[in-house]
Amino acid sequence: MAEAKHIQEEGQKLKAKNFESDQDIRWCPGCGDYSILKQVQGIMPELGIPKEDIVFISGIGCSSRFPYYMNTFGMHSIHGRATAVASGLKASRPDLSVWLVTGDGDALSIGGNHLIHLLRRNFNLNILLFNNQIYGLTKGQYSPTSELGKKTKSTPMGSIDHPFNPLALCMGAEATFIARGIDREPKHMRTILMRAEQHKGTSLVEIYQNCNIFNDGAFGGFTDKQMKKENSLYLEHGKPLVFGVKEDKGIVLDGFNPRIVDLTSGEYTPEDLWVHDEKCRNKANILTRFFDDPSLSESLPRPFGIFYQEDRFQYEEALYEQLNFMKEQKGTPDLDKLLAGSNSWEVK
């Protein structure tokens, strides 16, 4: 368990550097994790939360070194089980700001079962899911999000696994906040991180993160200056879905099927387009399927931003309501008496 050093003094104004630990960062030079770490450290002072009330929990993987680099409390737990550790912490200490850092392998392979149950329970915590579509820590095997046909050390003839769509999976698990960012767009990522922390319930942010050693350029179509505006769709609540270098393309819904239209043809105007609504579950489900739906006749841009959020009670709130109700009915229980039970005897 990493401890927060230099506990905040009363009235002290924190800065990003106050959240930098004294540990040497051991990610590969050029790794996208550096950008994510910088943005997370940057928003911490703006949350107005004392350092001793912030906890970072991780599983196993390159992303899971994160707690070492944050000058807060934290725990580097075991493979796929950071979700279980975080759930236990929130159940026992609902007052803490808990951040769970994981990767596409850690969260969606061995940890997949734990992830879906955390989402449906809706603990008030934040999940940062780094997706680089590869196993980086173990040197380049294919992961649950690697594309079909991906050639790696463990799939030399190409992967025959159909990959997970993380956000579609999370929507199916009844998540109350899902979003997507990318390491090369730090300002946008910063906005999403702030919104995630403000959400009451489990927020899940998928972050496209470049592994420049084992899967370099996996998201090049969304970061290359010449290509990204044609391939990326940035979602804003209440705004029409517009993209393109000259913002000359838009998305309309033909029934349940999204379709690209040309805004320069005169046939369509921004008023005719699909307007993003963060509260609409049905449309959020369609957005998560923009890039992997074989029924679509054309290649749609990849959405980034907040797909969906809803207000729903948090697990820990309901838990303490039950406990307080029973205390009112039966008084504060005697733990020793409970452990001893009613079926006991003495051995003479």
Image (tube, helix red, strand yellow):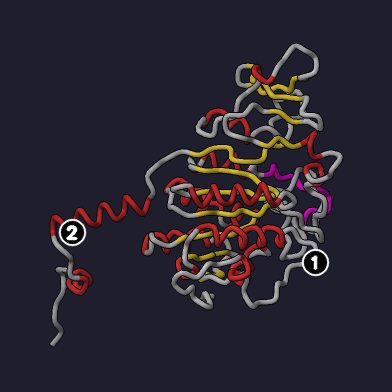
Q: Label 1 amino acid? A: Pro
Q: Is residue 183 left or right of residue 58?
A: right
Residue identified by numbered label 1:
29
Residue found at the very far right of the displayed protein: 226
| Residue 225 in view (yes/no) | yes
Q: How many marks?
A: 2
Question: Closest to the observer: 135 or 27?
Answer: 27
Query: Where residue 342 sits: x, y (%)?
Result: 14, 68
Identify the residue shown where x is 53% and y is 28%: 282
Q: In the rendered structure, does residue 323 fall within the stretch colored magenta?
A: no
Helix, strand or loop for disc 2: helix
Question: Closest to the observer: 146 or 345?
Answer: 146
Question: Closest to the observer: 80 or 66?
Answer: 66
Helix, strand or loop for disc 1: loop
Give the Cα distance between marks 1 and 2: 55 Å
Residue found at the very far top of the displayed protein: 267
Q: Label 2 amino acid? A: Lys
Identify the residue shown where x is 81% and y is 32%: 245
Nearer the camera: disc 1 or disc 2:
1
Earlier sequence position, callout 1 versus callout 2 = 1
Q: Is residue 315 left or right of residue 257?
A: left
Query: Where residue 32 sits: x, y (%)?
Result: 74, 58
Q: Is residue 292 left or right of residue 220?
A: left
Question: Closest to the observer: 193 or 347?
Answer: 193
Callout 1: few (<14), some (14-19), or many (20+) C-alpha neighbours within 10 Å? few
**What's the magenta region?**
154-163
Which secondary structure is most common in the magenta stretch?
Answer: loop
